Image (cartoon, rainbow, N blue to C red):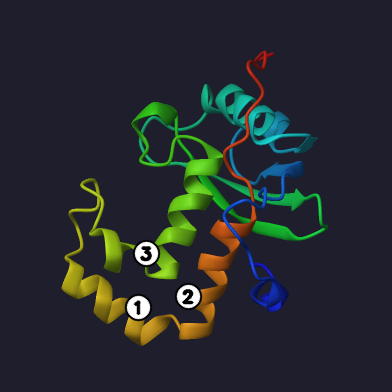
Amino acid sequence: MFGYAILEVERTDDMPKIPVTSVEIERAEGLVEECITVTVNSLAEADAVLSRWAVTAPKRGYDKCDFKITFADGETYSGRYDLSFDRTKQDTATLAEHVSRHCSFYSGLYLKTGMPSDMDHMTLAEYTTFLNRHVSEADRASYAAFLETYDLTTYPAAVAVK
């Protein structure tokens, strides 16, 4: 995950979010020749790599991809992305959506906004119980601070998929 130091930063609405400087993606499953590590400079470029790899991903199930996003202040966010053949049908089609939804879930954001319509496998009561049992208040605050501090939305106009 990320460090708790970000909790010490007092953010205001007019402060720009900290941008991504690089994204490292490692395909951990799939074709041997595609089980490589690639480093790119943006989330858009990372999505282009994932789209290229998706062509050989399972039509049922997924291949695991590990990733590390590095931000301009040196902070990193690491996780796993489940790559499927048709990324458009995933609830987190882009890497940014994946990270945003993961952090939103663990921050407790859905207690305020309600559950997203595509998360019908869990009621609000079940979500509350899950958070209370498994996610500390400090971790919730850290996930919320991450969403407020780091830019997951800045995309270049177009990225070519090779």
Mark 3 or 1, nearer chain start? 3
Query: As drawn, is 7 to the left or to the right of 21?
Result: left
Which of the pair 82/158 is nearer the observer?
A: 158
Classify 10 Å Cα crowding around label 1: few (below 14), some (14-19), many (20 and above).
some
Secondary structure state at the residue bearing disc 2 = helix
Measured Cα–Cα span from mark 1 to mark 2: 9 Å
Q: Residue at x 78, y 34 (%)?
A: 41
Classify 10 Å Cα crowding around label 2: few (below 14), some (14-19), many (20 and above).
some
Mark 1 or 2, nearer chain start? 1
Residue picked out by circle 1: 131
Secondary structure state at the residue bearing disc 1 = helix
x and y, in percent, of residue 111 in the image: 28, 68
Residue picked out by circle 2: 140
Confirm or deny contact between disc 1 and disc 2 (CB under 8 A): yes
Q: Quadrant of residue 152?
A: top right
Q: Residue at x 67, y 68 (%)?
A: 2
Mark 3 or 2, nearer chain start? 3
Query: As drawn, is 129 to the left or to the right of 21?
Result: left
Classify 10 Å Cα crowding around label 3: few (below 14), some (14-19), many (20 and above).
some
Q: Which is in the foreground here, disc 1 or disc 2?
A: 2
